Image (tube, grey):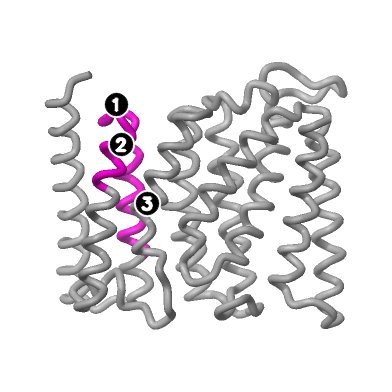
Amino acid sequence: MNYRSEALSALLTAVLYLGLFVGVEIWSRRRHPDSETSRKLVHFGGGMIALLFPTLFQLHWSVLALAVAFFAMLIVTKRFGNLQSVQGVERGTVGEIIYPLAIWSALFLSTLAGGPAIYRIIVLILAVADALAGLVGKRFGRHRYMVAGGSKSVEGSATFFIATAAIIWGGLPASGFAEGVHGAADPMGRPAEIAMMFTAILVALLLTGVEAVSSRGIDNITVPLAAWCLLALVGRIGDGMIPEILLIVVAAWLALWLATRLRRLRVDHAILAVLAGYAIRLLALFIK
């Protein structure tokens, strides 16, 4: 264990993040962009830096120490209003505060299973898919639906789904979780690439539901946790079950959507019911 290298990596990371915060804050005060835009820019930049962590650090505890330090800094700046580019959004949110801890949690989970490939998938979902969804929803969101703590847009959720599916599909070949999916063609003769596509769509659908019901910025922690769990479990089910599970999820999603149109359920309640039903189905398959 090279502690000097670990300390230098921590110092470099701290300088990069401080430079990101200061740079976006200066740009924000000069150009006066929408607060959501500057906030998502910090999230994207922070995610790009975080992609380097498996290379820079040998211990996830070093990242935890940094995360706690930035967590404390963000609480202080929120109290005194120093980082308006990140914390100046009108809606109440804790997303920017828990973001550092979300990055560490993704790294920690990847040390348990999955490795750097899964970590990078999760970070890209946080940095790219979530940021794109927020920006699209803010600018183009015309079809709103109510969730606890506010509303979200169909356009933003669709963007999150598409971006997440693309990230997972692109990252699965390098993932240990994908061994049961892309190791060979399944019994029905589908090539490995098609099996991975089913996996990406399935996980993206479910993560879109998790993101939709996670209001006030808590998706920064619920999405990484759900992504890791889903990739861990789905990867062990094997090729033959992916189309069946996907059809079940889509059918349930459409049925619950029709129910909400009849005003029998609120949208977030319908999504939670879908997620709960799928969790039971997935656990039953996994145990069996």
Question: The magenta stretch spans which residues?
Answer: 40-66
Quadrant in the picture for residue 183: top right
- Whole-percent x, y for residue 166 in the image: 57, 44
Question: Residue flagged by tag 2: what amino acid is it?
Answer: Trp
Quadrant in the picture for residue 193: top right
Mark 3 secondary-structure assignment: helix
Q: Which residue is rendered at x = 86% and y = 72% of the image?
A: 258
Question: Residue flagged by tag 1: what amino acid is it?
Answer: Gln
Q: Is residue 17 above or below residue 81?
A: above
Q: Which residue is rendered at x = 86% and y = 55% of the image?
A: 251
User: Disc 3 designates what residue?
Assistant: 101
Quadrant (top left/top right/bottom left/bottom right) for the C terminus: top right
- Whole-percent x, y for residue 105 in the image: 43, 44
The prevailing secondary structure element of the residues shown in magenta is: helix
Sequence-first disc among 3 and 1: 1
Local crowd size for mark 2, using a 10 Å CA cut-off: few (<14), some (14–19), many (≥20): few
> How many labels were placed on the picture?
3
Q: CA distance from mark 1 to mark 2?
A: 9 Å
Q: CA distance from mark 3 to mark 1?
A: 18 Å
- Whole-percent x, y for residue 226 in the image: 59, 48
- Whole-percent x, y for residue 124 in the image: 45, 45
Quadrant in the picture for residue 227: top right
The dot on residue 58 is: 1
Quadrant (top left/top right/bottom left/bottom right) for the N terminus: top left
Tell whether 31 sits left or right of 204.
Answer: left
Question: Does the residue at mark 3 contact the one at mark 1 (Cβ under 8 Å)?
Answer: no
Query: In the rendered structure, does residue 63 fall within the stretch colored magenta?
Result: yes
User: Disc 2 designates what residue?
Assistant: 61
Q: Which residue is rendered at x = 76% and y = 40% of the image?
A: 283
Question: Does the residue at mark 3 contact the one at mark 2 (Cβ under 8 Å)?
Answer: no
Question: Residue flagged by tag 3: what amino acid is it?
Answer: Leu
